[in-house]
Image (tube, grey):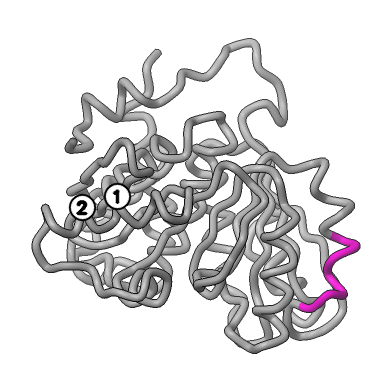
Amino acid sequence: MEMTKALARKLLRPRSPESHKGQNGRVLIIGGSKEYYGSPALVAGAALRSGADLVYITAPSKVAPTIAGYLPDFIIWEYEGNYLTDVALPVLQELQSRADVLVIGNGLTKKPAVLQTIHRIVSTWQKPIVIDADAIMPGLRPASKQVIYTPHSVEFQRLSGSPPSADVGKRSAQVSSFTKQINATILLKGRPDVISDGKTTYLSNTGNPGMTAGGTGDTLAGICATMLAQKHEPVIAAALAAYLNGAAGDLAYKKHGYCLIASDIISELPLAVKSIARK
C-alpha cells in the first residue's frame, strides 16, 4: 500500500484542542558519545518539530553540555563518562515514568560495553521504543510490545542475516516475513521506504537523493518517536514518519538542492505536518 498524502492525512491523529503540555508526546532519547553528539540533537529536534511536547535527552557528561546548547527546548539529563554504560541506568529509571516512548542508538557507538548496556535497557523497557543506528543488532529481546526498528540496507542485513532484495516486491515480502520472526515493525530505509509489521505493509516514495546527507536517519527516528508517543500503532507511526521525513526533505530540496542538510529537514517539518493535518 502506497503512503500517499491522502492516506497520510487519514492516518494522522488529529490533536485535541483541549490538550495540555505533555499529552501530545513525551520522548526520551538515549544517544551521544565522545565522538558523536549532533546525532541525538537531530533526533530531538525532529521529535519536537513533528509535534512532540517534551523531549528528554540522556547523554554522557562529556557531551551533554554541547547537546544542550543546540536548543533551549531540550531537557538534558547526564551521566558520568564518555559513552553509555551501566552508570546511566539509575538516570533512566528516574526518567522512564516521565516518557511515553524511548529512542535508543543514535551516536552511541558499537563499543562492546555500550552494546551490553543497550541490551540491558531494551530488555527491560516496556513502553514503546524506536531502535535505531548503533542499537540495531541481532539478539535483542525487547520487553516492549511496540517496537520499531529503522534500518538501512546494511543494518537490515546485520539484523536479519540477509541483504534486502533489489526488487521492491521481493524486498517488501522479505521485510514482512522477518517482522513476524521478531514481532516488531521494521522501517527499511531506501527508495521506496518499506514499512511492515507482518500484517500491513506500506511503501513511502517521498524523499530525494539530497537526503543522502548524514543525519537524515536521525530525523526519521525522531519523527517515529513522536508518532508513537501520540498513540499511533507502530506500523502507522513508522509509515507516517517515513512520509513526513521525505516530504520535509522534498521541501528542503526545493530550497537547497543537493546541498541540503538534516537540519534543513527539521526546519521544514512543521510545514510537512501541516500539509496533512486535519483541522
Q: At which x and y percent is residue 184?
A: 47, 49
Q: Quadrant of the C terminus?
A: top left
The relative height of residue 141 versus residue 50 in the rendered view (above or below) is: below
Question: Marks 1 and 2: in contact by CB < 8 Å?
Answer: yes
Q: Quadrant of residue 100?
A: top right
134 left or right of 30 in image: left
20 left or right of 16 in image: right
- Name which residue lies at 58% across and 66% down: 140
Say what secondary structure mark 2 lies in: helix
Three-letter residue code for mark 2: Ser
- Name which residue lies at 83% across and 75% down: 86
- Name which residue lies at 29% across and 74% down: 162
Which residue in the structure is indicated by mark 2?
Answer: 172
Towards the viewer: 194 or 245: 194
Q: Give me the disc on residue 176.
A: 1
Q: Quadrant of the N terminus?
A: top left
**What's the magenta region?**
85-91
Three-letter residue code for mark 1: Ser
Answer few, some or many: residues within 10 Å of disc 2's Cα (few below 14, many 20 plus, some between 14 and 19). Answer: many
Q: At which x and y percent is residue 239?
A: 34, 41
Answer few, some or many: residues within 10 Å of disc 1's Cα (few below 14, many 20 plus, some between 14 and 19). Answer: many
